[in-house]
Image: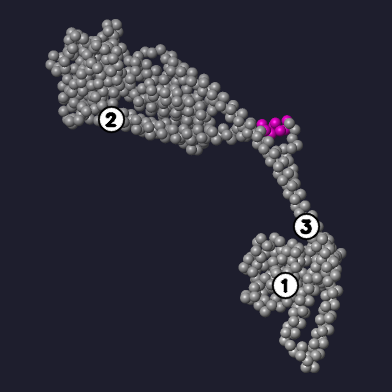
């Protein structure tokens, strides 16, 4: 019985660590309140523009891309999306040839952009893969956060609901949410 | 043949069936549980391997810019997976079939559900693992295992809802009872699985009872059949013995009659032959022709030899048919063996050795009958040695307080196994000139002395006849069994 209890406690501890890691959000974005004029990412002047900063190799971002696919399906025709995949200076030529990039490119209404040296990520003040920024028709920031409930997990979440409500004007007052994903930059980079 | 089930009352019979059914049920259920334990043992290893492959395929690395490290999912799959599977595997190996083992298995299996759900990013499809696991746990047909399984599922959701609510429900402040929503569906399935477990267990018990009843009936029928077969066998043996005795009795009477009728003409022939022989000898001494003829001498020898053979056959027939009761007198065994050896026809390639000690105790035997026994055994032994081989027949004896043990052993050709069983049967012989009565006379004579004879033979090496003769008490009765004096055949 003692062994069984010790075993159960050890497993519970392990699961707890795993769940804590799953629920640990990345660094939030310090996004500009207006669309950065120096950005080479094109903003849609006719509808909301969603920008997702993503790491092409981050396994956690798979959930963000899947959620984005659902979002675009739900808000079909009312939202333009740009997925900006960061490409560090030290990366190899095959860096952006990942299944994640391919999946994002297949989503209707989504434009995939390769961000050489992470310049666009810096312009948008983002540090975590899966970071979503929603800009209004006038280029003002309306939402910054993630659209998954946890790291690498799909499911109901506040960020998703907020984007939907902002685009459809259905009235959610949440302006931010946690974002889950790998770091966009090396540890030593600012 | 006794039939232990034949005399039971209905109540005793029902009780016996019930006890047997309980035992059958326990044995079958124990086998089923151990088999399910082994299934889960394989599942524990399989899930562990699957989790590692899953982690390596889906989320092998965590990134920070261009730098990477192994993803926490890989560590979780390897280490946490090993931890989850370790205790149930240990229990299955050391305590298969125990309730504690399946209790542990139930907990571990639901922990595996939680881990796999996590490793697959909380996909709704992986949640089917929970319900599949509950169904597999029902293989135990013990609804009690569903309790810890359900508690683990509920506790997992409760803890996650309490500490990391957004990861489960997508909102930061869910109602406290939200975990019950998930648990309720598990309980919903549990209800039907419990019913299934109870029904399956009852089916198992019903099967055991039917099996016990069939066994009981089969055993009863088997015992009856066995008794019937034994009775039939005994009846057949009795009929065979009766037929054999009748045939032997008829042969005995015929032999006595023929022997008696032939003895007188044979005596007349022998007398006539002796007379003619003397006349021929006389003529030969006077120089007449017939006596000097070599063919006459040879034919006279043939007549004498064949007359002796006829006398021997008649003597055997009469000895066997009359079965005279022995008249027992003390007589030294060594002297009796010496007399017997002298009566056996000599063969140049066979040495007859009398090894009976001179100081051996003196048995009480019918001298004539026992001499006939030795003559028959020694002659048979001598004739078992082929002419082209040299051999020997040794007769030895020893005595203790209860019996004499007399051995007649040769190193001849031995007796084939199929022949050995029949050598004491009257009129059975493998010799071209034998009457088939020699060993039958030996056995019947020894029976009348309360003695027995055993034969041990190895084809190609020789044969040993061993006579066990009980020592006779002062009252003239043997110490082992009474002396049998009934005639044979």
Find residue B480 and report its horizontal and vertical position in percent.
79, 61
Could you tell me which residue is drawn at 87 percent across and 64 percent down? B475
The picture quadrant where one finds residue B109 is: top left
* Residue that numbered label 2 is attached to: B61
The circle drawn on residue B244 is 3
Point out the tag, 3 or 1, that comes first from the N-terminus: 3
* Residue that numbered label 1 is attached to: B379
Neighbours of disc 1 within 10 Å: few (<14), some (14-19), many (20+): many
For numbered disc 3, what is the local secondary structure?
helix
The vertical placement of A172 against B456, above or below, is: above
Which residues are drawn in magenta?
Answer: B11-19
Could you tell me which residue is drawn at 58 percent across and 29 percent down? B204
**Residue at the extreme left:** A38
Q: Classify residue B52 as left or right of residue A27.
A: right
The answer to whether residue B153 shows anywhere in this view is: yes
Q: CA distance from mark 2 to mark 3?
A: 97 Å
Closer to the camera, B152 or A107?
A107
Neighbours of disc 3 within 10 Å: few (<14), some (14-19), many (20+): some
């Amino acid at each position: 019985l003692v062994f069984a209890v010790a075993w159960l406690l050890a497993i519970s501890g392990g699961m707890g660590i795993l769940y804590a890691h799953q629920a640990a959000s990345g660094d939030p974005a310090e996004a500009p309140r207006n669309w950065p004029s120096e950005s080479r990412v094109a903003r849609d002047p006719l509808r909301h523009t969603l920008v997702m900063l993503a790491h092409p190799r981050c396994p956690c971002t798979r959930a963000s891309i899947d959620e984005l696919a659902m979002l675009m399906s739900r808000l079909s025709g009312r939202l333009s999306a740009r997925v900006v995949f960061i490409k560090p200076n030290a990366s190899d030529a095959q860096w952006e040839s990942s299944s994640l990039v391919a999946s994002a490119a297949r989503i209707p209404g989504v434009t995939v952009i390769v961000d050489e040296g992470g310049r666009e990520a810096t312009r948008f003040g983002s540090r975590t893969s899966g970071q979503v920024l929603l800009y209004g028709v006038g280029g003002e920031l309306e939402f910054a956060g993630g659209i998954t409930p946890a790291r690498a997990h799909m499911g109901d979440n506040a960020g998703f609901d907020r984007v939907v409500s902002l685009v459809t004007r259905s009235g959610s007052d949440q302006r931010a949410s946690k974002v889950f994903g790998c770091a966009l930059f090396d540890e030593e980079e600012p | 043949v006794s039939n232990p089930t034949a005399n039971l009352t209905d109540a005793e019979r029902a009780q016996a069936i019930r006890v047997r059914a309980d035992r059958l049920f326990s044995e079958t259920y124990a086998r089923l549980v151990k088999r399910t334990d082994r299934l889960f043992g394989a599942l524990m290893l399989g899930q562990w391997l699957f989790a590692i492959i899953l982690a390596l395929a889906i989320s092998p690395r965590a990134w920070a810019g261009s730098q990477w490290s192994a993803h926490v999912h890989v560590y979780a799959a390897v280490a946490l997976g090993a931890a989850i599977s370790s205790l149930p595997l240990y229990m299955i190996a050391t305590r298969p079939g125990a309730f504690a083992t399946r209790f542990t298995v139930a907990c571990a299996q639901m922990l595996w559900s939680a881990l796999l759900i996590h490793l697959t990013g909380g996909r709704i499809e992986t949640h089917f693992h929970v319900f599949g696991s509950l169904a597999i746990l029902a293989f135990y047909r013990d609804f009690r295992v569903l309790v810890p399984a359900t508690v683990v599922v509920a506790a997992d959701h409760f803890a996650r809802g309490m500490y990391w609510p957004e990861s489960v429900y997508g909102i930061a402040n869910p109602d406290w009872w939200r975990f019950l929503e998930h648990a309720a569906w598990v309980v919903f399935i549990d209800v039907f699985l419990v019913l299934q477990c109870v029904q399956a267990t009852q089916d198992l018990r019903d099967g055991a009872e039917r099996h016990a009843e069939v066994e009981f009936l089969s055993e009863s029928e088997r015992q009856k059949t066995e008794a019937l077969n034994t009775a039939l066998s005994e009846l057949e043996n009795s009929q065979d013995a009766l037929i054999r005795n009748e045939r032997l009795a008829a042969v005995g009477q015929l032999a006595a009659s023929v022997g008696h009728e032939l003895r007188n003409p044979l005596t007349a022939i022998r007398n006539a032959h002796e007379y003619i022989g003397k006349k021929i000898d006389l003529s030969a001494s006077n120089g007449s022709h017939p006596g000097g003829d070599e063919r006459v001498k040879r034919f006279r020898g043939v007549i004498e030899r064949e007359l002796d053979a006829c006398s021997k056959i008649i003597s055997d027939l009469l000895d066997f048919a009359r079965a005279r009761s022995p008249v027992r007198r003390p007589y030294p065994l060594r002297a009796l063996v010496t007399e017997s050896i002298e009566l056996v026809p000599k063969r140049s390639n066979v040495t007859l050795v009398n090894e009976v000690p001179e100081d051996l105790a003196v048995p009480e035997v019918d001298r004539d009958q026992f001499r006939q026994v030795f003559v028959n055994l020694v002659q048979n032994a001598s004739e078992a040695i082929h002419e082209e081989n040299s051999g020997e027949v040794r007769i030895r004896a020893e005595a203790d307080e209860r019996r004499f043990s007399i051995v007649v052993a040769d190193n001849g050709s031995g007796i084939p196994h199929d022949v050995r069983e029949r050598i004491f049967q009257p009129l059975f012989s493998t010799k071209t000139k034998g009457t088939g009565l020699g060993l039958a006379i030996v056995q019947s004579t020894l029976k009348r002395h309360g003695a027995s004879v055993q034969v041990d033979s190895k084809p190609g090496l020789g044969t040993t006849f061993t006579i066990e003769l009980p020592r006779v008490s002062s009252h003239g009765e043997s110490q082992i069994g009474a002396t049998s004096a009934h005639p044979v055949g």
